[in-house]
Image (cartoon, grey):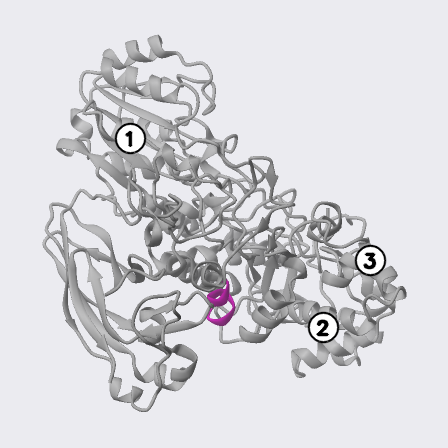
Amino acid sequence: SSSLLGAVVPALAADPPFSCGPSSTAATQGYAFCDATLPVAQRAANLVARLTTAEKVAQLGDEAAGIPRLGVPAYKWWNEALHGLATSGKGLHFNGAVRSATSFPQVSLTAAAFDDDLWFRIGQAIGREARALYNLGQAEGLTMWSPNVNIYRDPRWGRGQETPGEDPTTASRYGVAFVKGLQGNSSASLLQTSACCKHATAYDLEDWGGVARYNFDARVTAQDLEDTYNPPFRSCVVDGKASCVMCAYTGINGVPACANSDLLTKTVRGDWGLDGYVASDCDAVAIMRDAQRYAPTPEDAVALALKQHAAAAVQQGKITEDDIDKALNNLFAVRMRLGHFDGDPRANIYGGLNAADICTPDHRALALEAAQDGIVLLKNDASILPLDRAAVASAAVIGPNANNPGLLIGNYFGPPCESVTPLKGVQGYVKDVRFLAGCGSAVCDVADTDQAAALAASSDYVLLFMGLSQQQESEGRDRTSLLLPGQQQSLITAVADAAKRPVILVLLTGGPVDVTFAKTNPKIGAILWAGYPGQAGGLAIARVLFGDHNPGGRLPVTWYPEEFTKVPMTDMRMRADPATGYPGRSYRFYQGETVYKFGYGLSYSSYSRRLVSSGKPNTDLLAGLSTMPSPAAEEGVASYHVEHIGPKRCDQLKFPAVVEVENHGPMDGKHSVLVYLRWANATAGRPAKQLIGFRRQHLKAGEKARLTFDISPCEHFSRVRKDGNKVVDRGSHFLMVDKHEMEITFEV
């Protein structure tokens, strides 16, 4: 399979591939594309102008052929770095001096930390390790097809684990922080690596009810597209300065995403100003013809997206060579920004990175920090946690997810620096640990219930490590149920019944599960959600269980009951429709019962949060600005169009709000403060509430802090009408922190 942008894989050299510079062929020395003092666009155009049609076509796949006569090496565009360097792409190799890289937690867990700085540092560490691998000659590309910022719309989605969750604000800020870290966030024009935000847009289904991602046509309203599905991609490009956007397999309102000029040309390149390239997902162009029947021939598909059969498409007049040149200018410009045409990359600002910069103590510590900061405490009856290690004479560790190193790293993974399973983590705290898997795997078709119950009855404490695996949720595989698989529930219940005291349940999953049975069972004293916690996951879990870390994670997705599986996964509507019983999706619109709500998370400390002060927008700036009456179909007040307010006035309307947060003890801890907006009128498709800001703060026991949030009415008070227009309603808006509210008036 190949993707938009082949050649036989060459033997890996000890040196990184590059062009130009003193050691390159003498013939290239005078070429403008080798002159690093010229603008990148001029250099790229100079190189493209020297290529034959055949040479141009050979550059359009994810494996770009070398051009020996110009000293241009082969290049591999496809590399993965969602939560660490992965082997699933084609350009990274672990068969040389470096055999591993840091494996951070899967994204759904790090999202639970609600911590921009953490996300940035993870991206930065991954980018440094990628550049080090490249300098060592073990990478044939520095373009990373990460992050995945699709909205986690449906809890059954197999790839939801790769994303920052269901909230557009969180996904947007995650994308910006991760991209800046991955690309280097340097004042220099040189990119550390190139980040690619995927999969634009409204992609969140693998294979459900006979509908596969390859032939699914997502029917999305203009309102949902603008206020839910597109914001993370807009932020990636506008604020994060991502150098790539990947288009999705799916169709959007009858047009495949990779052939959608409104999305890719008008919006991504035009409105958002992408400075980089657009990549199609693997084989997406062929799928336009074979699965979606959108293009009758391979050449027609290429005419829509530029890929295989490009030469034939030119010959048949379906595309021009100028179309190909535009694509190549974007591709070579990114390679030039990566320093591939500036001579030996070991002489640039990233040139000193080497094997000593991979799996460093700092990166290992960061992997541990990320895992323990994301872990969410869901239940803690009678404060059974944290455990006193001195009081635990023996511990039964039961469950298929207790001693499975591969499970910890989720999907899109590479060889980790180390792997600490939960079993190993607990063994570091308790001398007498008795282990029983209880099931062969998370599938758990058959359970050793009697043996597990006997072990529980004979042990001082019982720790259950249950959940999911890639066999239930992964790329190409959606879930059909939100319950724990197989015999897991009956095994947990039997063990809890047999144990001397309430048991502790640790869930390792990428997505939410309906554990109502455990939530309501008094014999299950505590529940932790630990995601897929990466290479240090077992240590992170143990540190939380035994009180060396105070949990502070908050759920980035709603945990729905099993009843939700009656909702068709193919229904893309976010807003509820009471007339038909459609419940809506995400905390913003869902009107049904939940197992656990978005943003939920307990701690070993007691925290309080309150809004203590707020400025006001200078609404005199609105004088003379006409309002837009609400359409008849949308009851409500008149509104100001954000475009009419304009960027200058929007900036002048900003004001501060101050939140006081206090840790009442007994432990030090990190706490994430979430600030929401509530509209005075929640009808006409307005969200019930909308997260507009968050901040993670470390507080010692007894300490308090005041956090200032910058509030932008144009961004934070705005809503999207049915016609897709972004407006700010005239009248009252309410800032919310927990149950504390402040009313802000927005009118002259």
Q: What residue would you read off at disc 3?
A: 299
- The reply to whether the C-beta atoms of the residues labelled 3 and 1 are less than 8 Å apart is no
Q: Can residue 365 be seen in the rendering of this structure?
A: no
Query: Tag 3: residue type?
Result: Glu
Q: What residue would you read off at disc 1?
A: 516
Q: Residue 292 in the image: state x and y as whole percent.
A: 69, 48
Closer mark to the observer between disc 3 and disc 2:
3
- The reply to whether the C-beta atoms of the residues labelled 2 and 1 are less than 8 Å apart is no
Farthest residue toward the right?
315
- The reply to whether the C-beta atoms of the residues labelled 3 and 2 are less than 8 Å apart is no
Number of marks in the rendered image? 3
Where 658 sits versus 568, above or below? below
Query: Tag 2: residue type?
Result: Asn
Q: Mark 2 packing: few (<14 Cα in 10 Å), some, or many (20+)? A: many
169 or 240: nearer the viewer: 169
Does label 3 or label 2 sit earlier along the sequence? 3
Q: Residue 94 in the image: state x and y as whole percent.
A: 62, 44
Query: Tag 1: residue type?
Result: Thr
The mark found on residue 280 in the picture is none
Q: What residue would you read off at disc 2?
A: 329
